[in-house]
Image (tube, rainbow, N blue to C red):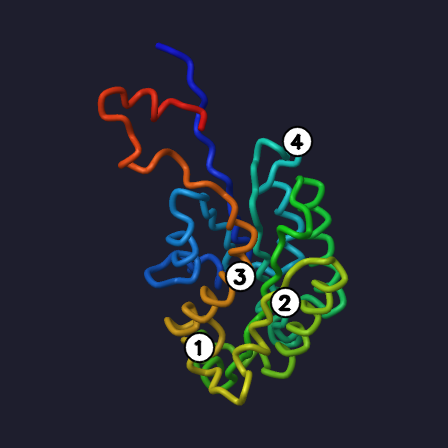
Amino acid sequence: MSKFKTVSWPKVILFGDSITQVSFQAKGWGSDIADKLARKCDVVNRGLSGYNSRWAKIVLPRLINNQNPAEQNIAAVTVFFGANDAALEDKNSRQHVPLQEYAENLKEITRLLASAGVSPDKVIFIAPPPIHEPAWEKECKLKGCPLNRLYSVAGQYAQACVTAAGQCGVDVLDLWTLMQKDGQDYTLYLSDGLHLSEKGNQFVAQHLWGLLEKLVADLPFILPYWGDVDPKSPENSLLSDQ
């Protein structure tokens, strides 16, 4: 058998907590991005439900190999933590991360990505969305615990994310601000006061694509369009390095 070059897809990695983990569900924001990038990129879901930024920076080196950065061919990475970090210390100390440490963890994640060959211009922070306390309190009661997150505290973590992004030189999708822009009802974007509704997933996909598109716009369509395959000699078309 003749030798031919293995086809390698660039990767877009979605790194975050449960809002990222479930983003590949039907009509999820991750699924939408993956659909847009079919035949251009592999969209890799590395969402870890319940994780905070402290655990994220520890586990990241296990997810991205920094030994051969060029071989990984990473086109972009989204970093979406904060919803768990913002849990109240006296109500949910297991997930809570102090505000300043959260900001430092995001900076450390950027440094770890850079050491793996992912430069800051390929990184997008996603700030946590606002919390709807009445809806989330109902969820907490169902689990036998008191309300463990507050709207105002989530806002502080969102602002810390935006500030850290500026200091790291990375793009940021500020969901906290965008979902409340012009006085719109942000609760429509949430399913349970914390996680995204179908409309919220559409919102994230739309706004994230606005930032992500410029990073992948020049990537080629992988393997020839079917109409360009030579039917008399398909090997010449399909086994070419082009």
The answer to whether marks 2 and 3 mark residues whose Cβ atoms lie closer than 8 Å is no
- Residue type at tag 4: Gln
Q: Residue at x 54, y 79 (%)?
A: 131
Earlier along the polypeptide chain: callout 3 or callout 4?
A: 3
Helix, strand or loop at label 2? It is loop
Alpha-carbon span between mark 1 and mark 2: 20 Å
Residue hosting label 3: 50
Q: Nearer the viewer, residue 223 or 189?
A: 223
Work out which quarter of the rendered image holds the N terminus and state it: top left
Alpha-carbon span between mark 3 and mark 4: 29 Å
- Residue type at tag 1: Tyr
Q: Residue at x 46, y 57 (%)?
A: 21
The answer to whether marks 2 and 4 mark residues whose Cβ atoms lie closer than 8 Å is no
Q: Nearer the viewer, residue 174 or 81?
A: 174
Residue hosting label 4: 67
Residue hosting label 2: 85
Number of the front mark, 3 or 1 = 1
Residue hosting label 1: 189
In percent of width and height, residue 43 lies at 46, 48
Specify whether 153 is left or right of 33: right
Q: Residues within 10 Å of mark 4 (few under 14, many from 20)?
A: few
Earlier along the polypeptide chain: callout 2 or callout 3?
A: 3
Q: Nearer the viewer, residue 78 or 169?
A: 169
In percent of width and height, residue 195 lies at 46, 71
Q: Residues within 10 Å of mark 3 (few under 14, many from 20)?
A: some
Helix, strand or loop at label 3? It is loop
In percent of width and height, residue 115 lies at 71, 41
